[in-house]
Amino acid sequence: MKTVIMKLMLLFFFFPLTLISGGCVSVPLEQNVLSHTLENNSTRSAGRCDLRQLAAAPHPQTQNISALNADGFSLLSWNVQKGNHDQWENDLRRLGADYDIVTFQEAFLDAGLRQVLDEHNYFWSINTAFHLHDIATGVLTASKKRPHYTCAFRTEEPIIRLPKTILINRFPLTGQPASHLLVANLHGINFELGVTGYKRQILALQEMLSHHQGPMIIAGDFNNWSDERSEVVKQLAASLSLKMLTYRIDDRSTVFGKTVDQILYRSLEALDHRTYRVATSDHNPLIAKFRVKRAN
């Protein structure tokens, strides 16, 4: 079995290595995060994550800033596979494309994606893993309400040396002046036969998020395609008191029989959640609706 997995892993990273050797891919030397704001139609840089900064980031007064509805907000999480398949934008529109929060992995920030984001008046940030044909590719989080704090970090793949990226946003909530929603968009390390690098990435995220008090979501492509990786995710959830969404009809994509796309949450109630089959990515999208958990 291990021999089969090793052969499949070689196939998985052969194509990225071909792109690198062919000069199609370039990796930024420094952390590269762009955020698009609607007010001035401009794009600006966003910061690296710093544990002390994340804990000390000021909590704005929600009456002075647009806030997420604590009584109900929607989330779409989807690895869009760099928009490789034609018509993926149509799939997105069919799914609604009007969610309060969207977390994309392998987002390819070309004209098509920009158009979709502009059509729906999204604020957005992308943490660039690399440029493919000079176009930023990485995790992208879009939202109807502007986050008041954004940070990011990246971890290099042990074998292919391309980064995997994480993007963190924090949102004010209506009627919750002392509580804010933190959303982490994760693309987990993939190309590794053990779990050393994977565990390092997840533990770094765990330590960072431990400084946030209040509602939290971690959504994305966890790449937890083995028992060992799934155990790392379980430890992450236990450490941060997170629950994992499970599905009555589960059409999530699988690798080696394991579902790799996850939504973890805490201090929230899941009002609705489902998965959809699509033909325009090798991952199927996850959709959920939450509200802030009410005190008994």
Image: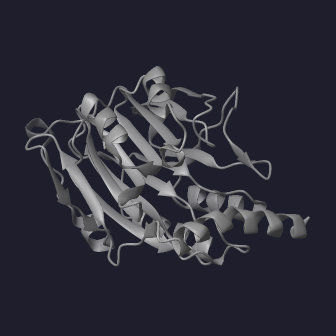
Horizontal side of 284 relative to 28 (left or right) equals right
> In the rendered view, how is the structure colored?
one colour
In the rendered image, which quarter contains the C terminus?
Answer: top left
**Residue 290 x, y percent position in the rendering:** 44, 31
| Residue in the foreground of this view, choosing between 272 and 63 | 272
- At 36% from the left and 40% from the top, the residue drawn is 113
- At 52% from the left and 71% from the top, the residue drawn is 20
Residue at the front extreme of this rendering: 22
Residue 69 visible in the shown view = yes
Compared to residue 51, the image places residue 41 above or below, namely above
Compared to residue 127, the image places residue 179 above or below, namely above
How many numbered discs sit on the rendered protein? 0
Horizontal side of 212 relative to 207 (left or right) equals left
Residue 183 visible in the shown view = no
| Residue in the foreground of this view, choosing between 263 and 214 | 263
In the rendered image, which quarter contains the N terminus?
Answer: bottom right
Picture quarter containing residue 268?
top left
**Residue 79 x, y percent position in the rendering:** 53, 45
Compared to residue 248, the image places residue 219 above or below, namely below
| Residue in the foreground of this view, choosing between 2 and 51 | 2
**Residue 228 x, y percent position in the rendering:** 74, 65
**Residue 232 x, y percent position in the rendering:** 65, 64
| Residue in the foreground of this view, choosing between 282 and 260 | 282
- At 60% from the left and 28% from the top, the residue drawn is 276
Picture quarter containing residue 249?
top right
Residue at the right extreme of this rendering: 1
- At 34% from the left and 26% from the top, the residue drawn is 71
Compared to residue 52, the image places residue 112 above or below, namely above
